[in-house]
Image (cartoon, rainbow, N blue to C red):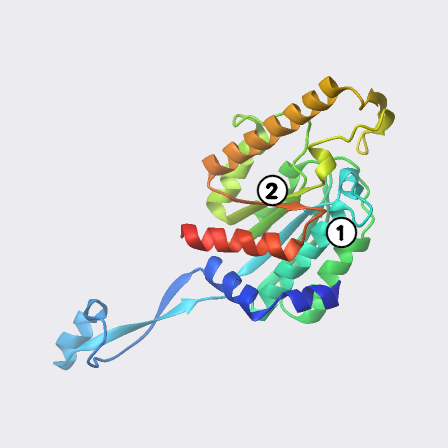
Amino acid sequence: MEIRTRRAVSDALVGSYHSVFRGQGIDFEESREYFPGDDVRSIDWNVTARMDRPFVKIFREERELTLMLAVDLSASQDFGGVDRSKREVAAELAAILAFSAIRNNDKAGLLLFTDKVERFIAPRKGLQHVLRVVREILFFQPEGRGTDRKVALDYINHVLTRRAVVFLLSDFSSGRPIRKEEPEARLLAVTAARHDLVLADIRDPRDAELPAAGRVLLEDPEKGERFEVNTSSAIFRRQYQLIGTAERRSWERLIRQCGAGCMSVSSEKEVLRELRAFMEGRAARR
């Protein structure tokens, strides 16, 4: 994982990360004498009047960011195809983001959650810290099996006192559309107002479409419930697809309304390519 992701964090991706995710703002550093070509809008009129010659204000960008990775470790994240599970996809995406952060001298932190907060690692810098973050995502054994994104968002809003870049990695699947008046939707809006919030939707193709494989026994990984379905039925497969489509569209609508960012990552596609497409799209909108 380290070799693959560190190779992926090329100069091009780090540049995109730097330009897409801004610092806290700019701080006044000093005033210096005006030179031809300086922006006249930056003239420091108080110092100019006092020194009887033009001076300009110099500002320094407060670049340092805090990247917080909130990763869903509920039982549904263990689902996936032959090559990798959703949890492994989330780990790779988190690793690329974390390595990009330390390449920009930013801090990276981690929150693991199920239906409760499982583990919190405070934001820090350094390679060893990032390797610990990736290791925890891959090998941590959670106590819970369900999903409650509200507890993760509420925890982040309490522990992060300054604005941060927050990536929420989950499959955002509940089997029904989400409504804007629900507590989770309201908390998403609050978090997006406080932080630069990006929802990373980790999906497997079978989340949206079932193959025609005859009668199969399915199990809800979070509740443990089992039920038999006839995937040979075109009507059943169509209903399954419609439910998934309605759910995704409700999330997309909610994300636009609350001002958060959104990217979708498939377990059968290259993570780096989808992350780069998200960053390029966001840079173009800005």
Which residue appears at 79% of the width and 28% of the height? 212
Residue 119: x and y in percent read 73, 50
Q: Which mark is residue 183?
A: none
Other residues around mark 2 within 10 Å, as few (<14) / some (14–19) / many (≥20): many
Secondary element at tag 1:
helix
**Mark 1 residue type:** Glu
What crowding class fits label 1: few (fewer than 14 Cα within 10 Å), some (14-19), or many (20 or more)? some
**Could one spot residue 259 in this view of the protein?**
yes
- Give the mark nearest the N terminus, 1 or 2: 1
What's the residue at 55%, 47% (across, down)?
Answer: 198
Evaluate whether residue 115 shows in this view: no
Q: In the rendered structure, which amino acid carries the disc numbered 2?
A: Leu
The residue at the point 57 percent across, 51 percent down is 166
Q: Secondary structure at mark 2?
A: helix
User: Which label lies toward us, 1 or 2?
Assistant: 1
Left or right of 27, for residue 50: left
Residue at 82% x, 20% y is 230
Q: Which mark is residue 153?
A: 2
Q: Which residue is mark 1?
A: 88
Return the residue nearer the eye: 78 or 30. Answer: 78
Frontmost residue, 25 versus 12:
12
- Placement of 72 over or under 212, stated as above or below: below
Is there CB contact under 8 Å for labels 1 and 2? no
- Residue 17, how many percent across, how many down? 53, 61
| Image side of residue 123 versus residue 74, left or right | left
The percent coordinates of residue 98 (x first, y second) are 63, 61
Q: How many marks?
A: 2
